[in-house]
Structures are given as C-alpha cells and as structure tokens.
Amino acid sequence: MDIPPLAGKIAVLSLGALPLSYALNHVSALSYPLGVVLMSALILGLFFLAIYSLSRGDIYYDPLYAVFAVFAFTSVVDLLIALQEDGYTSGFMEFYTKEGEPYLRTAHGIFICYWDGIVHYLLYLAMAGAIRKRKRYRNLGLYWLGSFIMSILVFLPGNILGKYSSETRPAFFLTIPYVLVPCWAGLRVFNQTQAPTCCTSNMVQEEQRKGLLQRPVDLGLIIYLVFAAFFTLFRGLMLANMFYVLPFYGLAAYALIFPGCSWLPDWTLVFAGAIGQAQFSHMGASMHLRTPFTYRVPEDAWTCFFVSNLLYALGPQLLACRCLWWPAFFLRPPPGSPAHHKKQH
C-alpha cells in the first residue's frame, strides 16, 4: 500500500487553530455556553469557505477533501485540549472545556483528544494529500472510519450518561453533523474501487490450495484470535467489544481457514482502526490521574496490564497487514478452480 503525501496546504491552515484558540480564550462572550456554540459554528463555517475558495478543484474532484480539511482543523483543537488538560499548555481552550464539552476533561476524553489530534490528524493530511495527487486512499479511509466510529460509540454515551451528563451544553449538538458527515464519508470510502492486486489466477489457486499447516502466519493469527476472544469475554464490561469485536474475531478465524472470503481485507482495516483507538484510550485512561482511584490500575500491575492490552491492540493491526500484503488467499477463486466449485456446492 502506497502512503500518499501529506497535504501541506491543509496542514498550514489547520495550524491556524493555535493563535485562533488562544485569542478566543480571552473573549468574554465565550464564558457563556450559547456564545461558545455560535462562535464554534461560525469558525467552522468560515474555515470551510476558506478551503473551498483555495481548493475548489480538489473539492469538485472529491468532496471528502473539504471534510478532511475541516476535521484536520478540529483535530488540532483536540490536541490543544488534551495538552492543556494534562498541564503542558495553558490559555488556549479553557473556555471550551468549561462551557462547551466538559466531558473532554475526563481521563477518557483526554485520550480521545490525543488520538484525534495525532493519529486522525495524520490520516486527514494523508487522505487529503492523496486526493490532491489523484491517488487512492481507500485503505487509509477504512482505517479512519473504524477508528472514528469507535470514538463516537464511547463519546456519545459518555456525554449522555457519564459524570457530566447533567452539564450538557448547547455545543453538544455540534456532534450531530460530526456524526452524520463521517457516516456519509464512510459510505463514499466503501464505494470506492479497490486497488488492483498483482496476484495472477495461478497465484490465487496455488495459495488457496494450501492447508492451514502450510500457512504458519495464518495459523498463528488464528491462535491469537482464539486467545483474544477469551480476553474479550474476560473484559465483558466493555460492551462494544462484546457486541462487535467478538463476532468479528470468529468471522476472521473462519476467513483464515476457508479461502475466498474477499470481505476480510476491508473489514480488518475497519476493526484495526476501531481496536487501536479503543485500546489507546482504555490503556491511557486506566492509568491517568483523572481516573478515580478505585477504577485506576494499581502501579504494581502496570506491566501486566500494559503488555496484555498492547498485545490485544497489535493483533488486529498484524491481521490487517497480512490481508493487505498477501491478499491471494482472500480473493475470489477464478472460475474452474476447486475452491470455486466448493463455494458453489
């Protein structure tokens, strides 16, 4: 998979969030919740107009260019929030965490912001750069989609049912387009044509004739999936893992045994992004001082906790790499092959 160049124009414009947030932090009107939401909507609208005027051709080619540009700007804001709440900066986004979305002041909210401000930001720049160079970015888009959906699955219930549920501000309603737009973007990413593979029909037939013992990498991944499924059951309180990740592990193991499951490469990218985001936020929040002491991982258990959760996070990334780098086993078998007849009967 080729990594597209980063979009320099969007990077420069998104960094405008630094002086802008510092200036807005000292505006007295933003000490009120309604002022925060109106100013936030105005800034995002003006930023979109700026992107549209500067990159009209790129937006006509692919409207997601504008989406990634606006989200890159919000990613910089999220990184400022995380750094501010951890005490690395001050004077930037106090007004927003107090009068906009106080949930972001929790340990989990902080690490959602870190992930958005680093991983999502780089993905936005890479995907926008690919659009500008007229290159494919479907794989990056699927990884981003899974990661973004997982963050929303935690973010929304955390706002509605969590510690700050009684302090919901008007800025919370900005999450409505923040959810709907990625859903539309995700459908566009899924509908993009897949990159052509270099696998010939002979290569596909040869790979799909191999038994599991002749594919040690796949055997190791299946063993990992079995252990990961038990680990998921052990952590049954994380309902998102129980309802979504556990069934996927079962389906992925099936696809590693039986050839021709062409849906696996796409969905491994989605789940790799989702599990990567979820594990990063879970691991960071579980050891953060903002987490109540009774829910925090004890210091003497940090090593065991970190290693086990890191392995749980790395497995889906390795599975996604396996599917992308050696896809022959998952391609649809060519007509006339033994695997093709097995599929039909």
Image: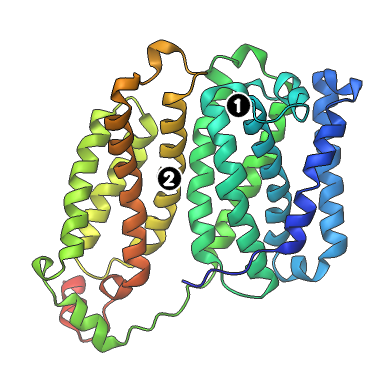
Q: Position of residue 135 (x, y in %)?
A: 60, 74
Within the image, what quadrant is residue 116 found in? top right
Q: Position of residue 315 (x, y in %)?
A: 30, 50
Residue density around tag 2, few if under 14, some if 14–19, many if 20 or more, within 10 Å:
many
Vertical position of residue 32 compared to residue 187: above or below:
above
Quarter that holds the C terminus: bottom left
Where residue 339 is drawn, which disc sits there? none
Please indicate whether residue 168 sits to the left or right of residue 193 in the image: right
- Label 2 residue SS: helix
Residue that badge 1 annotates: 86
Q: Residue at x 24, y 42 (%)?
A: 228
Q: Which residue is mark 2?
A: 276
Give the mark nearest the N terminus, 1 or 2.
1
Vertical placement of residue 121 versus 206, above or below: above
Residue shown at 74% from the left, 23% from the top = 94
Image color mode: rainbow
Q: Nearer the viewer, mark 1 or mark 2?
A: 1
Q: CA distance from mark 1 to mark 2?
A: 22 Å
Q: Position of residue 63 (x, y in %)?
A: 71, 62
Q: Residue at x 29, y 27 (%)?
A: 236
- Count of marks overlaid on the render: 2
Left or right of residue 129: residue 51:
right
Decide: is 304 above or below 1. above
Q: Amino acid at mark 2?
A: Gly
**In this view, 36 is above or below 213:** above
Give the residue at the far right of this rendering: 28
Which amino acid type is shown beneath numbered disc 1? Asp
Q: Secondary structure at mark 1?
A: loop
